[in-house]
Image: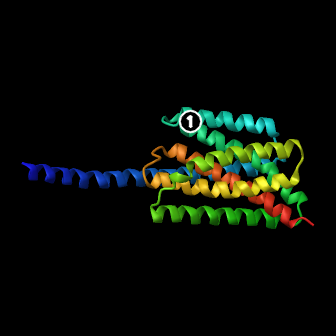
Amino acid sequence: MDRLTDVRRTQATVIAAPASVLETNKVLRNTYLLLAATLAFSAITAGAAMALSLPHPGLVITLVGYFGLLFAVHKTAHSAMGLVWVFALTGFMGYTLGPIISAYLQFVPNGHAVVTNAFAVTAVTFVGLSAYAVKSGRRFSFMGGFLVVGIIAAFLLGLVAIFFEMPALSLAVSAMFVLLMAGLILFQTGEIVNGGETNYILATVTLFVSIFNLFTSLLHLLGFAGEE
């Protein structure tokens, strides 16, 4: 009887393991497909903002729009409406990015090179970190608390740098965000691979925000380095 029970448990484990792997692969695939679509949509809205010479909405509208849309995404992440709000959020972020890129192209020496290099470094960083997290199969949950505290601290310091016009602090915040966003990409991808994140909408938003902040932070750092 005990032998029969052990055999049944072994069979259940063998069946459950592939099912778990399939579910993880499905989340990972859906996340990357949605991420690619949102990045493309964001690029379109950024390009439209640049072509129409639209002004930047300003800090207050940007923060209210971002956190408001992010809240809507989290509230509807388990329904079809979540997809609508994801594109609303990423489209809005693309719109805010358009005037920033235009400013770098117009006013920063070698602005085209700065934007191109920031884009290239962002792409290589994301692909490299994602590939490492997927192939290694490691879980980076130990970074969770540090990332939360670090992002909140960097965000508050960024506001201080803006309101008190402190360029040195602003550069330090950008450097912090580069490291924090790299860590967040590792953390989120590791969670997907190990089944810690099963909602591809939430995973997509986290990775999109990481890429967005990584790109804008690199723009700031490379733009400063390229100034005369």
Placement of 114 over or under 65, stated as above or below: below
Residue 176 position, x and y percent, is: 72, 55
Q: Residue furthest right?
A: 228
Q: Element at badge 1?
A: helix
Q: The residue under label 1 is which amino acid type?
A: His
> Position of 71 compared to 30: left or right?
right
Residue in the picture at 52% in, 37% down: 77
> Position of 223 compared to 116: left or right?
right
Placement of 54 over or under 39, stated as above or below: above
| Residue 185 visible, this orientation | yes
Residue 100 position, x and y percent, is: 81, 51
Residue 5 position, x and y percent, is: 13, 49
| Residue 40 visible, this orientation | no
Which residue matches tag 1?
Answer: 74
Residue in the picture at 48% in, 61% down: 134
Residue 7 found in image quarter: bottom left
Residue 106 found in image quarter: bottom right
Residue in the picture at 36% in, 53% down: 22
Q: Residues within 10 Å of mark 1 (few under 14, many from 20)?
A: some
Q: How many marks?
A: 1
In front of the other: 111 or 196:
196
Placement of 105 over or under 46, stated as above or below: below
In front of the other: 114 or 143:
143
> Position of 198 compared to 178: left or right?
left
Q: Quadrant of the C terminus?
A: bottom right
Residue 92 position, x and y percent, is: 70, 42
In front of the other: 226 or 4:
4
